[in-house]
Amino acid sequence: MSCGEPHEKDCSEVLDHLYEYLDREMPEGECADFQVHLDECSPCLEKYGLEQAVKKLVKRCCGHDDVPSDLRSKVMGRIDLIRAGETVPEVSVLEQAKKEQAQREQAAASEEGTGPSGAAGSTDARSRTARAE
């Protein structure tokens, strides 16, 4: 994308780093250059406005989900591994968390007697008792 006008910062470079600017992850000096470009270039300003609106919409619609603390700690652990240059397990953090949650639920169900030998077993026992009477 380009407006056809010469700029100190090329449109493609601005768009490549747009989310850094939106997320305020860009160094101060570069932010000023970005703002100058956006003030001069209406196509890039339009793209910026669109991406800003999408970001606000996502935050409004998806920003209220509670993240389980164990999932958060696992994700942060993976990030630390990546930053340290260590090998990261091939299983996704989300899949690993789902698997562990299912195991916890299965264990809880077994303890409460609602597992395969629990509820079903007691139903079978009640049926046999009813037939015997």
Image (spheres, rainbow, N blue to C red):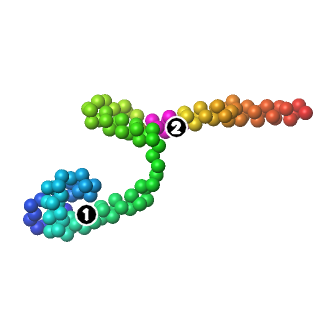
Residue 13 visible (yes or no): no
Instruction: State which quadrant residue 80 falls in.
Output: top left
Q: Position of residue 95 (x, y in %)?
A: 45, 38
Q: Position of residue 109 (x, y in %)?
A: 63, 35
Q: Earlier in the sequence, mark 1 or mark 2?
A: 1
The secondary structure that most of the magenta stretch takes on is: helix
Q: Position of residue 15 (x, y in %)?
A: 21, 58
Residue under the image location 50 percent in, 34 percent down: 100
The relative height of residue 111 versus residue 44 in the rendered view (above or below) is: above
In the rendered structure, find residue 101 and report the number of the disc placed on it: 2
* Magenta stretch holds residue 99: yes
Residue under the image location 18 percent in, 58 percent down: 31
Q: Which residues are magenta?
A: 94-102
Mark 1 — residue? 48
Q: Is residue 83 left or right of residue 111?
A: left
The amino acid type, in three-letter code, at marker 1 is Tyr
Q: Secondary structure at mark 1?
A: helix
Question: In the rendered view of the protein, which quadrant contains the N terminus?
Answer: bottom left
Q: Residues within 10 Å of mark 2 (few under 14, many from 20)?
A: few
